[in-house]
Amino acid sequence: MSATAAPSQAHAIGCSHCEDDAPAPTGARIRGWVTAIAAALVLVACALGFFALFPAWVNPLFIVAAIVGIIFPAQRALQALRRGSLDINALMVIAVAGAVAIGEYEEAAMVVSLFAAAQWLEAQSLERARKAIGRLLDAAPAEVLIRDAAGAGDRRIGIDAVAPGAVMIIRPGEKLALDGIVRSGRSDVNQAPITGESLPVEKAEGDEVFAGTINGHGVLTVAVTRRRADTTLARIVHLVESAQTQRAPVQQFIDRFAAWYTPSVVILAALVVALPVLVFAQP
């Protein structure tokens, strides 16, 4: 799905805020490659150290692994600093820099590789949610064939212009643009995009149909019951987006804890370094 198509489709199904905030790529694939490179470097360095092969390469490999693994945490730490806060990413950057400074290259590479792997898993879950929203955005057409109440024939109009009570004509193989009640006709409708049902459902006069479903062999005349913003499909998109942005109670607690813990640790570490020099004149 192209970047230009996503906002228009979001508008079509009723996801009004998606027009300005379409689901953006999470970069999970790039994170995966970076994490894999860092992990591979760590494994190679550990193997060389264990078998005493090319010992001069071991520490440089650990250093390169630490640099590669810290790329994305450093970006997040910089973003947090711009917001005026210190988060776990900033603490990780400080820890890795400190480990490298005192010569603990293996520890620095190990820790940052595990941390990068955890962030890659998080990006993977967000990527799946983004793709799910993209599939939902593609589920409903942007136009609908409407039967003119004045008898002027059938015409296609934009989905925004369709009000409840209008009569849609759904031809074989077409997707339904809006929710409605079948007024006439009989057909099997594939509701898998909405309900997950594996088999098409027979629809006849008086049955309810949903936006995003696919008509089968017959022609249906459907009276619209909901505007685009109120369709079942629009509500599903909203629920998926809400699930993507919400955090579990444990995550919320960790975020609140980290907001105090991270600055406290940084300040305490600075005091441990500075006090002996300033108060006791020790090197």
Image: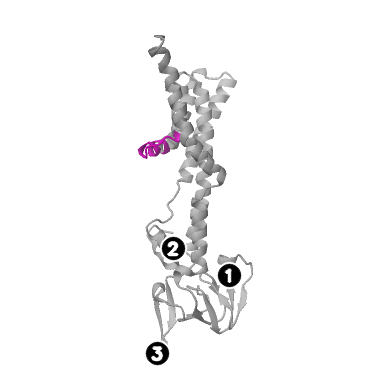
Tell me the element at label 3: loop
Q: Which mark is residue 130?
A: none
Q: Residue furthest left?
A: 82
Residue 41 seen from this side: no
Tell me the element at label 2: loop
Mark nearest the camera among 3 and 1 is: 3
User: Does residue 263 appear to the left or right of 196 in the view shown?
Assistant: left
Q: Which residue is mark 3?
A: 150
The answer to whether marks 3 and 1 mark residues whose Cβ atoms lie closer than 8 Å is no
Which residue is nearer to you in this view: 65 or 90?
Answer: 90
Tell me the kind of residue under disc 3.
Answer: Ala
Tell me the element at label 1: loop
Q: Residue 56 location, x and y as percent? A: 49, 18
What is the C-alpha distance between the residues marked 3 and 2? 31 Å
- Residue 193 shown in magenta: no
On the image, which quarter does residue 275 sit in? top left
**Vertical placement of 34 versus 141: above or below?**
above
The span picked out in magenta is 76-89
The residue shown at (44%, 59%) is: 1
- Residue 84 shown in magenta: yes
Q: Which residue is mark 1?
A: 191
Tell me the kind of residue under disc 1.
Answer: Gln
Q: Residues within 10 Å of mark 1 (few under 14, many from 20)?
A: many
User: Does residue 240 appear to the left or right of 143 in the view shown?
Assistant: right
Report the label total: 3
Q: Which residue is mark 2?
A: 15
Q: Residue 251 location, x and y as percent? A: 54, 43
Decide which of tag 3 and tag 2 comes sooner along the chain.
2
